[in-house]
Image (tube, grey):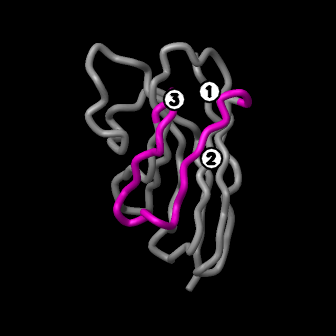
Amino acid sequence: QVQLVESGGGSVQAGGSLRLSCQVFGYMYGIDYMGWFRQAPGKEREGVAGIATDGGSGSYADSVKGRFTIAQDSAKGTLYLQMNSLKPEDNGMYYCATRKRRWRPILSPLSPDEYSYWGQGTQVTVSS
């Protein structure tokens, strides 16, 4: 069983920055992807960024490219999301998630359906 705990959310003004962290507890064997997702009130959960656990530069939603950076520290079992130049449209609850390796390759690192374990979320509020 894998447990995920997010932190680092808060309230900032537009143009500001936040760094989210996700601590992973439990056995990571078989986990091949980790990702960040967000959900605004009344909207569906959407993928923000995803990264393979064996390395790589990460995949990003078009809306955050050039502003957000996903990174992992395997030794610490931690996933990060550095968010710069925040906009009011970035408001929402941010969740981290991990994907348990399946019989088929991942179709999209940004698809919530691909992921198996989820954290409780951390709120991000950006004011204009």
Residue 28 tag number: none
**Horizontal placement of 14 versus 21: left or right?**
left
Callout 2 touching callout 3 (CB < 8 Å): no
Q: Is residue 83 above or below residue 59?
A: below
Callout 1 touching callout 3 (CB < 8 Å): no
| Residue that appears at 59% across and 45% down | 71
Q: Which label lies toward us, 2 or 1?
A: 2
Q: Is residue 15 above or below residue 3?
A: below
**Horizontal placement of 35 versus 110: left or right?**
right
Local crowd at mark 1 within 10 Å, few (<14), some, or many (≥20)? some
User: Quick one: SS at disc 2?
Assistant: strand
Q: Position of residue 50 (x, y in %)?
A: 44, 43
The residue identified by callout 1 is 3
Whole-number angstrom distance, CA of label 1 to CA of label 3 = 16 Å
Whole-number angstrom distance, CA of label 2 to CA of label 1 = 16 Å
The main secondary structure of the magenta stretch is loop
The residue identified by callout 3 is 53
Q: Quadrant of the N terminus?
A: top right
Q: Provide the residue span drawn in magenta.
A: 52-76
Disc with the residue nearer the chain's start (2 vs 1)? 1
Q: Position of residue 72 (x, y in %)?
A: 61, 39
Q: Callout 2, which amino acid?
A: Tyr
Local crowd at mark 2 within 10 Å, few (<14), some, or many (≥20)? many
Q: Position of residue 61 (x, y in %)?
A: 37, 57
User: Quick one: SS at disc 3?
Assistant: loop
Q: Position of residue 18 (x, y in %)?
A: 66, 63
The residue identified by callout 2 is 80
**Residue 36 part of the magenta-drawn span:** no
User: Quick one: SS at disc 1?
Assistant: strand
Q: Which label lies toward us, 1 or 3?
A: 3
| Residue that appears at 58% across and 18% down | 28
